[in-house]
Amino acid sequence: MRFIAILIFSGLIFAGAARAQAIAEAGLLRHIEILASDAFEGREPGTLGENKTVHYIASQWSAAGLHPAGEKGSWYAPVSLVERTPDTYRIYFANKGRGKSVRLRPDEIILRSRSPSFRQSHMPVVFAGYADLERDGLSVTGKLVLLPRKPPEDDDMPDFRNRKLKLIRAGAVGVISVVEDQDRWSRFQRFFQRGSTALADPENHADLEGLISFEQFGKLVRQSGLDAETLLADKDAISIVDLGLNADASAETQVRSYLSHNVIGKIPGTDPKRGALLFMGHWDHFGICRIEDPLEPGKDRICNGAVDNASGISLLIETAKRLSGEGQDRDIYFLATTAEEKGLLGARAFTDNPPVALEKLIAVFNADTIALSDNGQEIAVVGPAETGLDKDIGIVAAQEGREIDRSGKADAYIKRQDGYVFLELGVPAFMISSAFADEERLKAFIDGPYHDVSDEVNDTLELTGAAADANFHVALGRYFASTARYPGIATSGEADN
């Protein structure tokens, strides 16, 4: 019995020592090799590749000593998704006063329906500018709305998604977005034709949705004696404009509903009333992303997503190992999201039904696309600078011998990652990485392997900066989970003291 007790005690010492060891490149590489292997088929949501991926993450967090924090005491939180692909569609516009039809080029307007089939006649057509609907008190109920995609300036205007949602929830029967840049029409059209995935919430979708080119939009508004460029440029004075048109439209759409999953784990703190910390990263990628070419049988068809984002998940696994069992004060949550590549959908599902009140979150740290830099010293902070946390992040950086790139260039990616969902809700969220401080390598990746079959485990995979970033996240966890080191409350609200 004494011999057995010694073995158990020795095992505990060994486990504690393993947690204390710095994260090395080899540890990250092991996870990336598995997650980005062909066996995982590119980790597309709703596939066998997803099943393997979420099981691997959960098993790793379980072995690290985390507690499951998903639905009903499991590791998983289901995320209901729906994919819509345009099939056939027609739309006719007519001037209300003269009854004269307006002919548009059919290849410069494209439609899809929320349900498999849509048909409606005599829909009043309006233009929705940038002014506040609630302020103006103008109704869009039962109307077809033409909506510009981008405000004239990058200011505090709500983004396209939120402006569109406001119109849908105000009763618009359809929303057709205007592609302001005619030169980019073909790109937007191809993307729309491939289909779109969204959360399976009917409130997020109009009965009819679509795109129209700038030229055809201009042709429509001229029927009302208006100028397209003026409408798109005026963000203050113009809100809802009746274009004096009615529309008859029909659309047939392929609709596929399916279930995916977030993975959620937790390290319980000794003083959870003082708030919580969240580490996150997306596990999904594009799966089998190329059609088989009969002229080149056996050609690589899998988008493995080694850098984007098997690397981020590897950081989360190794960070969880180091923080688990250390007896931190605050709860630490770990979240691996689905469908980030389809529009930050897993993150949105998490914020819709979080296991911890969002106002209790001290900070969110998102790990995405980390395996790019050979520089283990300089890091970029993608996220807001004035949250009250920038000073503390600077303290951790100084302790870890890291230099923060304060050029602001990396903020170009702030809306392209899961942390943005939390920022919209007022929760401080950051993506801190050496990869985003290495502008040259980041650009080379985005212009090359990004979202392609060539983002796989090979000689170009760079883990020097990734290992340093992983250890930095461990340091962030130890700092912000400690009420002695960081005594503050969540800046997004008042956590219980």
Image (tube, rainbow, N blue to C red):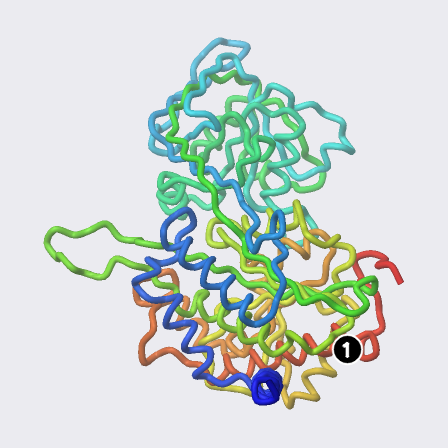
* Residue placed most toward the observer, 105 or 441: 441
Q: Is residue 383 visible?
A: no
Instruction: Determine whether, in the image, residue 493 is placed left or right of residue 474.
Output: right
Instruction: Give the residue at x 55% y 67%.
Output: 61
Measured as percent of width and height from the top left, residue 162 is found at 63, 42
* Residue placed most toward the observer, 433 or 220: 433
Vertical placement of residue 279 versus 421, above or below: below
Quarter where residue 191 is shown: top left
Q: Please identify the quadrant where the C terminus is shown.
A: bottom right
Vertical placement of residue 229 versus 268, above or below: above
Q: Please identify the quadrant where the N terminus is shown.
A: bottom right
Tell me the element at label 1. Answer: helix
Instruction: Give the residue at x 32% y 80%.
Output: 459
Measured as percent of width and height from the top left, residue 20 is found at 61, 86
Instruction: Give the residue at x 70% y 88%.
Output: 399
Residue furthest out toward the front: 1
Quarter where residue 26 is shown: bottom left
Check disc 1 and report the residue beneath it: 391
Vertical placement of residue 340 versus 220, above or below: below
Residue furthest out toward the right: 497
Measured as percent of width and height from the top left, residue 104 is found at 39, 26
Vertical placement of residue 175 versus 99, above or below: below
User: Which amino acid does the dot numbered 1 rest on?
Assistant: Lys
Instruction: Give the residue at x 31% y 67%.
Output: 454
Q: Is residue 132 visible?
A: yes
Measured as percent of width and height from the top left, residue 387 is found at 77, 66
